[in-house]
Each structure stands twice: as structure tokens, then as C-alpha cells.
Amino acid sequence: MLNPKEIQDLRDKHLGPSLSLSYKQPIHIVRGAGQYLFDADGTKYLDCVNNIQHVGHSHPRITSAARKQYQNLNTNTRYLDDTIVRYAQNITNTLPAGLDVCFFTNSGSESNDLALRLARNFTKSKQTIVLDSAYHGHLSSLIEISPYKHAGPGGTGAPDFVHTIPVPDPYRGKHRGSECTEGYVQEVQRAIDSIQSKNLRPSALIVEAIMGCGGQILLPPGFLNSAFELVQRAGGVCIADEVQIGFGRVGSHFWGFETHGVIPDIVTMGKPMGNGHPLSAVVTTRVIAHAFDNGMEYFNSFGGNPVSCAIGQAVLDIIRDEDLQSNALDVGLHLLIQLNALKSKHDLIGDVRGVGLFIGIELVKDRNTLEPANEEVDYIINKMKDKGILLSKDGPNHNVIKIKPPLVFTKENADFLVKQLDDTLASHKL
């Protein structure tokens, strides 16, 4: 086995310098099991951030499903096959009626790119409305609509067909507090007015029901309902980006958009869908799907292959059989209560927000000015790693600790996390 220096030397030689590593002293992870990761020295870490391993690292049923299908067949969608149609049926059964046509892809970025194609083909428009600080993927088409990237370091800004509204953040956004919803709804209307003033129509509003890279932001109640209504009335379609928040993570519902009582025209999914295996999808209405059948074949070499579908089906089965959605709700509530107690104890915590096991802790130097506590976040994340807990940060100001563990996370895990975080906050010295 290579030692860390040898690995780093080979990374420097053979991998692009734009790839990042977590922590000041990177860790050499060699094994995972459930909600735990283990390094080359045998150190055990509680994984509080890897939301892709949705049902736990190295779940034996995932391994078994992959091995069994690979031993039998792995091909593409140009042949009749049971696995893809059964899996498509089971995915659509989790969604509102009318969302019943699947396109399988291999990453959330692929899914969001395809969703844009579907929307633009259907509306004959490219005019896209996005939320500030949003991230929807790493393809060129998605960097264009992701302010988190195109407005950040190395970015070149948004093209003229992208219309960005302020992030609907009740804590530090343009409009704040419990009555901020209408202010953000009017921002959507202004974007639509701008589009229509050029004799154009909106193509799509693409949105996460809970913003991930934007800082684990809970959209204000009523905003998404009104935004969807405005966009659809103007002739656009609404895309729910469920790549980070779908598959029961929010606890109360299987999909994040359901927490707002809305029904999108297109849903994209990825990350946890294959529990680490590259698997993603777009689900839409039959009308939009049929409009896309314009003579140009849609073919994806690996999308919807039998091995991927077998793994995806195993993930669905495990979520059901192990009652992981209920666990996310129960453990998430337990954790949020304790984190809010920490907020009353430590002034560094400006805000605690989340649902289920999708939680953010925003750290600020001053609760009045909301100055981001960037150095403190870095210190705490690295100190928690030394205590055997893996966390990460997010948000446009990079001051939000994100907590998105595998859904097998327990109340005992939550208690351990809170105790160590309490101690670290109490003793931090920069």
C-alpha cells in the first residue's frame, strides 16, 4: 500500500491541480462500513458528510446486487431487459402522478444537462431562471446556470439567457425574516418581466427545494409554490433538482419538493441513487418526453444498464426495508434539537437549519453583522476530524458546516457529534 506522501506525489504528477483534498492533513481512507470510514492506520471516523453513500458504505445488499447482475449480463438500452423497466416503474411510483417517463444517466450533472435540453426543446426557449449561489453540475451548460461556479473564483459570469434571483435565504438574504416570502416571489416576477420585455418566454426555473452548495438553505414557506405558478403561467417549465436531497433524506417525504407541496414538470436525481455507483435519472411528463422525440435519438452508452438498475433497485429496497426515511426524520429532529441548544450556548453559531438528515450550521463572528466566521469553520472541521468525525463546509461564504450523513446514522451518532462539537466550540483557539 502506498503511504500518504507517495499518493500525494502521484496525485501531483498525474491528477489535475484543480482537484481538492479535504482537511489540512488529508486522510488516506481505505475502507467504509455503514456510517463509518477507516483510514490506513485503522482510525475509525464517523462520516457526517458523504450523502452519496445513502444507505451506508459497502452495504452488503448493494454489493450482492451488483455482483449478481454483473455475472449475468451488462449491456445497453437497445435490447429488451427486465431490470430497466421494473426499476423505472418503481422510481416513478415514488413520484406524483404524471411524472412517469424516465431517462437514465450516470451523474447528477448529466441529468441536469438533459433536463435543460428537455425544457428548451419543449418551450423553444433558452431563458433560464436560477437562484443565486445555486450549483447544478460541472458540465459547461451547468456552469452557465450555476452562480456558485460562474460567479465564483475562476468564473466568467452568466450568459445573457440566465436570469439570477437573490438566494431566498431568510437568515442573511436580500429579504429576511418570517415575512420574506413575497419579496422573493417578486424577484421571480421581475425575472419573468425582463424575459417577456424582449418578446421571449421563460424556458425553465431550475431549483433545489433545499439548497445544498448554497448553504443548506431552507426556502421560505410558500415561495416555491408561487414561483412555480408564475413560471408555468408564463409558459416555462419547472425543474426540481433532487440530486442532493432526494430519496428520503428530508425524512418527512421521499422528495424534497414534496415538502413545499409542488409538482414539478421535470425531476432530476443522482448522487445517492446508486449509493456510490454512477447512476442518475431524469423523470418528466409524457407530453415533454414525446416532444423530445423529434427524430434525434437519445442514447446513453451506460445510462440504464442492467448493473446500474440492479444497484438502484437495491437502494430503493433497502430504504424501504430498513425504514431509512423514518430514521432520517427521527434522528434529524433529535439532532436539530441538540444543535439549537448549542446555538443558545455558543455565539459563534448564527443559525441552525435543516430537515431530516440535511442540516447546516452557519458560523458568524457577530450575530448582528453576520460576518462569516471562515477561519473558525476551518479550525472546527479540522479539529473534529482529529476527534474522529468527518464534516465539511459549504455556502457562498464558506462558513456553513454541512451535515449530510448516510441515512443509517443513529441517535447515538448524533449525540457523539454534538458532544464533540460542543467541546470544540468551547475550546477553539485560532
Image (spheres, rainbow, N blue to C red):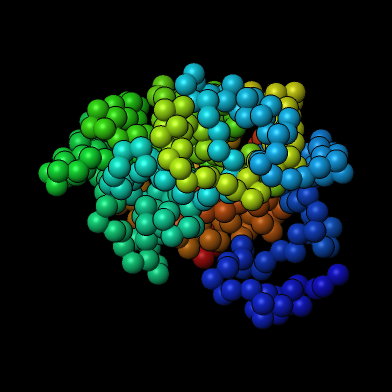
x and y, in percent, of residue 407 in the image: 67, 35
Q: Is residue 96 above or below residue 347?
A: above
Tell me what residue is drawn at x 26 percent, y 32 percent: 235
Outermost residue to the left = 197
Q: Is residue 177 visible?
A: no
Task: Give the farthest residue toward the front.
Answer: 295
Q: Is residue 33 left or right of residue 347?
A: right
Q: Quadrant of residue 141?
A: bottom left
Q: Position of residue 428 (x, y in %)?
A: 55, 58
Residue 147 placement, left or right of 339: left
Residue positioned 30% across, 58% down in the render: 158
Left or right of 24 in this view: 117: left
| Res 291 quadrant in image | top left
Residue at 67% x, 77% y is: 14
Identify whether 232 is placed above or below 426: above
- Image position of 17 with respect to 31: above or below: below
The foreground one among 261 and 215 is: 261
In this rendering, would 356 be left or right of 234? right
Between 173 and 79, which is closer to the camera in this rendering?
Answer: 79
- Pick the quarter of the image with the N terminus: bottom right
- Compare residues 147 and 296 and report the one nearer the observer: 296
Question: Is residue 385 visible from the viewing direction of this image?
Answer: yes
- Residue at the (66%, 41%) spot, across then down: 77
Q: Position of residue 404 (x, y in %)?
A: 59, 42
Q: Position of residue 186 (x, y in %)?
A: 20, 35
* Callout count: 0
